[in-house]
Image: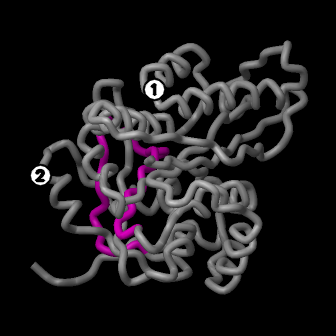
Amino acid sequence: MSNRVLCREASHAGSWYTASGPQLNAQLEGWLSQVQSTKRPARAIIAPHAGYTYCGSCAAHAYKQVDPNITRKIFILGPSHHVPLSRCALSSVDIYRTPLYDLRIDQKIYGELWKTGMFERMSLQTDEDEHSIEMHLPYTAKAMESHKDEFTIIPVLVGALSESKEQEFGKLFSKYLADPSILFVVSSDFCHWGQRFRYSYYDESQGEIYRSIEHLDKMGMSIIEQLDPVSFSNYLKKYHNTICGRHPIGVLLNAINELQKNGMNMSFSFLNYAQSSQCRNWQDSSVSYAAGALMVH
């Protein structure tokens, strides 16, 4: 065995966000400076994973709730966009690069997860093609910069899980979620509306299309705030809202559910909602973004 350190390059830098460290730092600082930290310290956050010009300011609402003084390990749960996956997958590298600084994967926790037999490995190709985890790396690096050598990350690519698998993974992750030094980042955009997404749900009673989309998203968001995985599944079955991180969200809700059974008191609040553009006719399309935080009381 060689001791060569394997790295995942910041493959979306230069396209989805700037590859210049100083420029990226200034952007993130600008967005974070406009936001209040009302839900700090967050134990988990939900935040979007689109290009930063679209969702950077929305994501800041979630990252502002992260407390770098207590956070030492960060799980990042992202949905798989390019490969069919029925379970969850772990990275095969040691380091995730960002234009700010490199992030280290926690090989000890990876070892614990690996032992369960519930995970597969993602190839470097799959890892670098996927944006759902990468888009959280610069924000994670920025939020943690005051303790940059003192934390590790645990990236997990989440497949198209059945409800029972979401429960199993929720159970598995719940013991990590119970630890105040561990943060969960759940990567998800909300409604993808329009012909190119093959989704055009419209409730005329809401007025313009973009208002109908907002109403649909906020219905889902308030169900997530109730912390009930079954209601969230039922909502998705009923409206088929194209929330791309629905499985990572399902896993988080099941983990929370597990801890609530053991008497832990938690609350989740959404802090921001945005749309990439306002749809007014059937030719339009948009993606919605939401940012929120979980607190333990």
Where disc 1 sits, the SS reads loop
In-image side of 160 versus 290 (left or right): left
Residue at image mark 2: 115
Q: Specify the segment rendered in magenta.
A: 71-96
Q: Can you say whether 230 is above or below 20 in the image?
A: above
Q: Residue 123 has which mark? A: none
Residue 123, percent across and down?
31, 58
In-image side of 209 versus 148 (left or right): right
**Quarter of the figure with residue 180:** bottom left
Asked if residue 45 shows in the view, the reply is yes
Q: Earlier in the sequence, mark 2 or mark 1?
A: 2
Q: Can you say whether 13 is above or below 136 in the image?
A: below
Residue at image mark 1: 228
In-image side of 249 versus 75 (left or right): right
Quadrant housing the N terminus: bottom left
Residue 67, percent across and down?
50, 67
Is residue 81 highlighted in magenta?
yes
Amino acid residing under circle 1: Asp
The front one of 246 and 173 is 173
The residue that appears at 22% across and 83% down in the rendered structure is 4
